Image (spheres, rainbow, N blue to C red):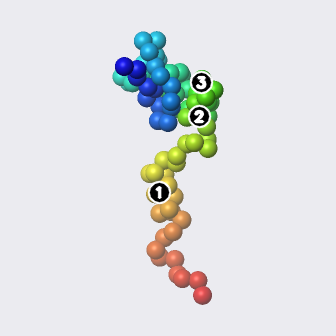
Amino acid sequence: MTEHCACPGCTCEVDANALMRDGEAYCCESCASGHAKGEPCHMSACHCGDEQGRQPDESKVDNALEETFPASDPISP
């Protein structure tokens, strides 16, 4: 049975040489760091680190919505 990289969206398979971080197996340092500096996955066929493929953090989206749409604003005429 093959194991896949723990990075969300990564399609890489990992083996005994996988990079281990917090009990999870990753295919490369980029995936293990969560693509913190925007670096791509080491496999050219995988696009898990691409900005286009990355989903926004839901808590940040919810927070932004709350900050930009206060219920106390009057309705525009």
Q: Nearer the viewer, mark 1 or mark 2?
A: 2
Q: Which residue is mark 2?
A: 47
Q: Which residue is mark 3?
A: 43
Q: Which residue is mark 1?
A: 63
Q: Quadrant of the C terminus?
A: bottom right
- Mark 3, secondary structure of its residue: loop
Q: Looking at numbered disc 2 in the image, what kind of residue is underneath it? A: His
Label 1 vs label 2: CA separation? 27 Å
Residue sitting at x 50%, y 31%: 10
Residue sitting at x 51%, y 25%: 12
Residue 44 or 49: which is nearer the viewer?
44
Q: Looking at numbered disc 3 in the image, what kind of residue is underneath it? A: Met
Dot 3 crowding, Cα within 10 Å, few <14, some 14–19, many 20+: few
Q: Which mark is residue 7?
A: none
Q: Position of residue 67 (x, y in %)?
A: 51, 62
Q: Cβ–Cβ below 8 Å for labels 1 and 3?
A: no
> Taking the image as drawn, is residue 13 in sight?
yes
Above or below — where is 77 with respect to 40? below
Q: Residue extending furthest bottom?
A: 77
- Mark 1, secondary structure of its residue: helix
Q: Position of residue 63 (x, y in %)?
A: 47, 57
Q: Quadrant of the N terminus?
A: top left
Could you tell whether 48 is left or right of 59 in the image? right
- Mark 2, secondary structure of its residue: loop
Above or below — where is 60 with respect to 25? below
Q: Looking at numbered disc 1 in the image, what kind of residue is underneath it? A: Asn
Above or below — where is 61 with respect to 21? below
Residue 1 or 4: which is nearer the viewer?
1
